[in-house]
């Protein structure tokens, strides 16, 4: 039997891989997508749904570095670590500490600001083409700082965002409660991003994407890619069950699972995962009318179609360990503090952000081969940056 052979193969059918495949197929290229599971059902399904073009602050900043010991050891902290993974994670953590210093962190914020500049407009165009504009809402977004001290400390974040051209309003706690009367009363205030857009239902958007790719006649190869071997004009992608798929150009976009594939083409990338959770509460009307992020608790409360999704927190623990009941319980406690009227939890989820130490995604040609493109490491803003990434990859190809 002949191996399937294509002009371009994209490995990974998350929001990044699908956007890339869509953009290339639309321009008339012969593209196939390799994905072992249902398209778009990894991290791209369970996120908070914000098109966060205001998210110009990298995870690593001097403030975070200073707070790291407290964040790691406080049981109610939004950040936790499984100590069994520390030896493997050490290179990532060392680079993260370096990237959190004032100089690198400012440079990373600037790089993020440039990437995010056009993110909202590109999503609008993409959603329109997909017939999914009804899933995008320009309803603003709130970042709560729930103590006077935290609100004052957030001045540094405000400056970093404004330096990168983000439109934001600084508002008091009472102004927040006028906008969102369902929230518990709190001290402090908020940053309000009045123009922010969010997705009503990331899962529905992913399904729309998948069906559009189907309409375009794209081959979706249901397989797991294990390694890539380049020879001559083509690269062979070795998959499970002895399947080999050949392509002139290969795009690695397997999210948090991209490291081994990159290594097979000689790229030693520092990629790991920040595990994140969500809880959903089914209800006809959400208690908040726009995504509200609790900065201290590290999660968003996002209104979604027929439900409220509480999504966020960071856990270092790799992709193999099961979900932690303690982390889910902590997320639920935080959600009930923020929104006391919540009923029973309807469902829970764990997902894997593809994370690099400087928070700036890897979108470039492989240093070893101009036929291999890397497109992963989008961390907390992969949904936001998916159409931007697709445009960049198209230009590289
Ligand atoms: C709790 C939480 C909240 C978030 N909130 C937001 C938000 O509000 N806004 C935002 O912009 N971002 C958010 N994010 C981040 C965002 O979800 C991710 O950055 C984004 O989904 C990454 O997309 P991806 O396509 O790279 O990865 P994924 O969606 O994980 O897709 C990768 C795909 O590759 C496939 N794959 C894996 N291994 C292989 C292989 N060997 N061969 C072939 N295919 C393979 C997987 O099955 C998967 O389908 C959030 C993340 C989490 C966890």
Image (tube, grey):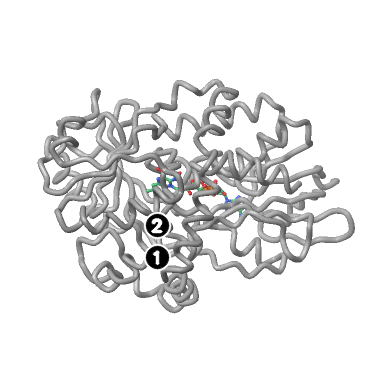
Quick check: is the Cβ at mark 1 less than 8 Å away from ligand 1?
A: no
- Residue 301 visible here: no
Q: Would residue 52 be found to the left or right of residue 65 on screen?
A: right
Nearest the viewer among 213 and 386 is 386
**Residue 309 found in image quarter:** top left
**199 or 215, which is in the foreground?**
199
- Residue 256 screen position, x and y as percent: 52, 57
Tell whether 173 sits left or right of 70: left
Q: Residue 136: x, y in percent? A: 44, 27
The residue beneath circle 2 is 275
Mark sitting on residue 354: none
Taking the image as shown, residue 56 lies to the left or right of residue 4, namely left
Point out residue 152 in the picture as x, y percentages from the top left corner: 21, 56
The residue at 72%/44% (across/down) is 395
Which quadrant of the view contains residue 90? bottom left
Label 1 to label 2: alpha-carbon separation: 7 Å
Q: Say which residue appears at 73% left-offset and 48% top-offset.
A: 396
Which one is nearer the viewer's eye here, 74 or 3? 74
Residue at horizontal 25 percent and vertical 48 percent from the top: 294
Kind of element beneath mark 2: strand
Callout 1 secondary element: loop
10 Å crowding of disc 2: few (<14), some (14-19), many (20+) = many
Q: Which residue is mark 1?
A: 317
Tag 1 and tag 2, C-beta contact below 8 Å: yes
Q: Nearer the viewer, residue 386 or 168?
A: 168
Taking 199 as reference, is 292 left or right? left
Above or below: residue 109 compared with residue 55: below
């Amino acid at each position: 039997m002949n191996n399937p052979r294509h002009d371009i193969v994209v490995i990974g059918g998350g929001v990044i891989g699908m956007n890339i495949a869509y953009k290339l197929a639309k321009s008339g290229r012969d593209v196939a997508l390799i994905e072992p599971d249902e398209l778009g059902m990894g991290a791209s399904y369970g996120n908070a749904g914000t098109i966060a073009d205001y998210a110009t602050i990298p995870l690593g900043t001097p403030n975070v570095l200073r707070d790291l010991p407290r964040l790691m050891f406080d049981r109610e902290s939004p950040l936790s670590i499984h100590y069994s993974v520390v030896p493997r994670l050490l290179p990532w953590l060392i680079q993260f500490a370096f990237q959190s210093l004032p100089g690198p962190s400012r440079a990373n914020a600037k790089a993020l600001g440039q990437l995010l500049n056009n993110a909202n407009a590109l999503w609008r165009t993409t959603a329109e083409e997909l017939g999914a504009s009804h899933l995008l809402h320009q309803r603003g977004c709130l970042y709560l700082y729930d103590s006077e001290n935290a609100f004052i400390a957030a001045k540094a974040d405000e400056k970093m965002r404004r330096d990168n051209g983000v439109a934001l309003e600084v508002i008091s706690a009472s102004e927040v409660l006028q906008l969102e009367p369902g929230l518990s009363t709190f001290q402090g205030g908020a940053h309000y991003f009045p123009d922010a857009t969010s997705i009503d239902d990331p899962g529905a958007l992913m399904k729309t994407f998948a069906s559009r790719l189907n309409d375009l006649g794209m081959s979706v190869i249901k397989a797991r890619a294990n390694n890539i071997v380049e020879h001559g004009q083509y690269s062979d992608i070795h998959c499970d069950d002895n399947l080999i798929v050949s392509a002139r150009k290969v795009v690695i976009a397997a999210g948090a699972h991209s490291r081994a594939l990159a290594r097979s083409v000689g790229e030693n990338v520092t990629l790991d995962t920040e595990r994140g959770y969500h809880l959903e509460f089914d209800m006809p009307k959400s208690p908040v009318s726009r995504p509200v992020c609790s900065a201290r608790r590290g999660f968003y409360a996002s209104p979604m179609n027929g439900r409220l999704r509480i999504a966020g927190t960071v856990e270092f623990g790799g992709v193999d360990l099961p979900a932690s009941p303690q982390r889910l319980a902590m997320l639920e406690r935080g959600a009930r503090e923020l929104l006391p009227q919540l009923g029973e939890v309807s469902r829970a989820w764990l997902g894997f952000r593809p994370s690099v130490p400087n928070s700036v995604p890897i979108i470039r040609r492989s240093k070893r081969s101009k036929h291999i493109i890397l497109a992963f490491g989008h961390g907390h803003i992969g949904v936001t940056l998916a159409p931007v990434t697709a445009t960049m990859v198209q230009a590289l190809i």
